[in-house]
Image (spheres, coloured by chain):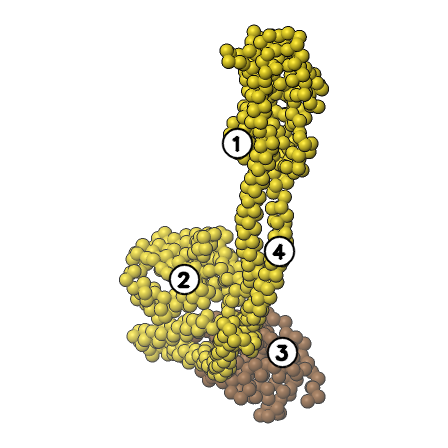
Amino acid sequence: MSTLQHPGPFSRRQSLRWRLPFLVCVLVAVVLVTFLWAAYLRVEATLVRAAGERAQVAADQVASLLDGRRTMEQMRQLGADPALRSFLQSPTDETREAARVRLRPLIGTSPRRIELWDAAGSRVLEFSTGVTLPRGSVPLVPGIRELQQSEDVVFSDNVAEIRDDSGPLGFLLIRSTFVETPPGIFSRLVGRDAVVRVANRRGDIWSNIAGPAPPVPVDLGRPGMGQYRADNGEMRLGAASHIRATPWAVWVDFPLTMVVAPARLFLNQMIGVALIYLAAAAVMVGILSARITRPLSELSVAAEAIAAGDYSRRVGGNRHDEIGRLGRTFNAMAGQVQEAQQRLEARVAERTPRLEAANKELDAFSYSVSHDLRAPLRSIDGVSQALLEDSADTLDAKGKGHLQRVRAAARRMGELIDDLLELSRVGRAEIRRDTVGLSEIGHTIAAELRKAHPDRHVELDIQEGLVADADRGLAQIVLENLLGNAWKFTANVSPAKIQLGGKQADDNGLGAVYFVRDNGAGFDMTYVDKLFRPFQRLHGHGDFPGTGIGLATVHRIIDRHGGRVWAESTVGAGATVYFTLPQHAVEVEA
Amino acid sequence: MRTRVILLVEDSADDVELTRRAFERSHIAHEIVVVTDGQEALDYLFAAGAFAGRDPNLTPQVVLLDLKLPKLDGLDVLRRMRADERTRRLPVVVLTSSKEESDVVRSYDLGANSFVRKPVDFDEFLDAACQLGLYWLVVNEAPPAVTKPSAT
């Protein structure tokens, strides 16, 4: 039976049927995600840039509304006003009234304060309206001044120098808050969600037009776009613009989330589209994979069936692609395997009776040898003995000696026949493996040897606990031969020592090794090759009797157990015969 | 009734001679009746053929049976003996050259009382014959004789 390894458990995870679609889907998903993300980033960057530009435009527009050049021109004209000039040149009630009349129209509806100072640094005339703005103080420098803050009011000063041809006469100070004119124009300009701030360019005072506002952490020193994180954690995007002829700047910003909201929307829509694509790809690849793997799995089922012995199994091969070709090739191969199998079976069927007949013949032959070859030997021996007894008077010593030699020859031939039959039998016997105690068998044989040769004194050392996986009867024959040989070849030494020992199988896969050692005659290692061949004897029959078949029998038995046998010796210093009996391979279901 | 007869079923004249000699030397005084094939053995036991005149109730004390015999072999003889009421319990010692395991097993299966292999060495053979005679003719208690003839 072949030892075909059965395919292991087949999980769906490992199946090509599922792995292929999975891989393709992962690939498609990776590509889609990469593209989507790149597109999203591009859209977002574009939106941010557009929003920044929009903020810049809005800031520029607000800045142009607050352009200081008209105010400066107005102030310059006021500085040259004759009424104010004459009042400061000669402050009389009359000129005071004229100056008052001239300045009164400048007080509008918005909170405003107007002061007139003389060159000596004294306030000589003042008006105020709306919320009370603090009074001005020296020194006064002409021009539009930086924003100032007083409690919850942000205001700024316009200062004009009043002078005549001879030199400066005094200053006109117009202190006012911002007023949106017309109201709501800023939010129309910048849109909802946007905020507008006016601040000093150095960023110290901030105003939201109506009043003071918390500072925004951006650099107003240079006009342009910028981003910052607000106190509530949201990112805001904006732009700064300088207001001409003033030390102020305008800042307009939007929440970034609002800016990138369309990008998010775009991303969500694209994810939806991508999922549809992915699903479509999964279905298509799944169908394709099924078309590819179904014939493969059919093929593998068929191959398993053939492996299990169903040689007639075939697969459908009507496709015109590589898989179809594979199927047809497989069928052709299966056909050949089946044919080969049938030929083999036919040959076995043809040969089995011949083999059986040969075996029967061999059995009959050895049976016949056992009976018929021994009977005449018995007659020869018996008749020789009868002759010795009955004709003792007429036979001389020479004749008696001849008869003794006839008898000895007959007995030896009997032994030869017995040993040959045994050799033949161990070659044919069925091996019934079992756990065999070699030590116990050794003790039994030792006892028999001692009983048969009570005159011999031999030190027999048998290691305890030796076991082997072997046929009990054959193992006994092995030990009988080896211990018998050792016994025989130690006949001429004293003290005679025989040892039966071994090393059990270890975990390294080395099988058990057993040995029988003696300190007897030994043999010449030159002839070690002949040791285990039948009828090969390394000693003269006169020295040690024997048939030369014992070790051949041992060799055949060990061989049939799948083991090895070998010997080492030094002439005159004893011999050691080693043998192995490997564990019979236990067949395990995979 | 039992007679002081040993039935020796043996085709080899040499073996017969050696067996006689061994019994003589062992001082066994029983009469040895020799038959040389299986059929003759059955004829003797059942008083048929050449032994038609014999009283079939006179059974031998022990049968020494060789296995390799002309005509009917030893195992056939044993089978017929055990199938017949008169010889069912008769002690049979298989005395043969072989010690093939199959012979031993089948002999015991068919009801042999003992299995002895004839050694080549005459001294050993002598020893075996002596012990055999002593045991089966002296020590062993024979089964009661069957006196009623069978229907056959």
Residue occupying the point 57% across, 86% down: B41
In this rendering, the label closer to the viewer, 2 or 1? 1
- Looking at the rendered structure, the kind of residue marked 2 is Arg
Which element carries disc 3, helix, strand or loop?
Answer: loop
Q: Quadrant of residue A299?
A: bottom right
- From what the image shows, is residue A375 above or below residue A574? below
The chain letter under disc 4 is: A
Residue ID for mark 4: A273
Where does residue B40 sit, x and y in percent of width and height? 56, 88
Circle 3 residues within 10 Å: few <14, some 14–19, many ≥20: many
Q: Earlier in the sequence, mark 4 or mark 2?
A: 4
Confirm or deny contact between disc 4 and disc 1 (CB under 8 A): no
Residue occupying the point 54% across, 46% down: A42
- From what the image shows, is residue A430 above or below residue A182? below
Residue ID for mark 1: A223
Give A45 or A131, whichever is nearer the viewer.
Answer: A131
- Looking at the rendered structure, the kind of residue marked 4 is Val
Q: CA distance from mark 2 to mark 1?
A: 100 Å
The chain letter under disc 1 is: A
Asked if marks 4 and 3 fall on the same chain, the answer is no
Which element carries disc 1, helix, strand or loop?
Answer: loop
Residue ID for mark 2: A564
In this rendering, the label closer to the viewer, 3 or 2? 2
* Quadrant in the picture for the C terminus of chain A: bottom right
For residue A250, say whether it is visible. Answer: no
Left or right of B78, for residue A328: left
The chain letter under disc 3 is: B
For residue A7, say whether it is visible. Answer: yes
Which element carries disc 4, helix, strand or loop?
Answer: helix
- Looking at the rendered structure, the kind of residue marked 1 is Pro
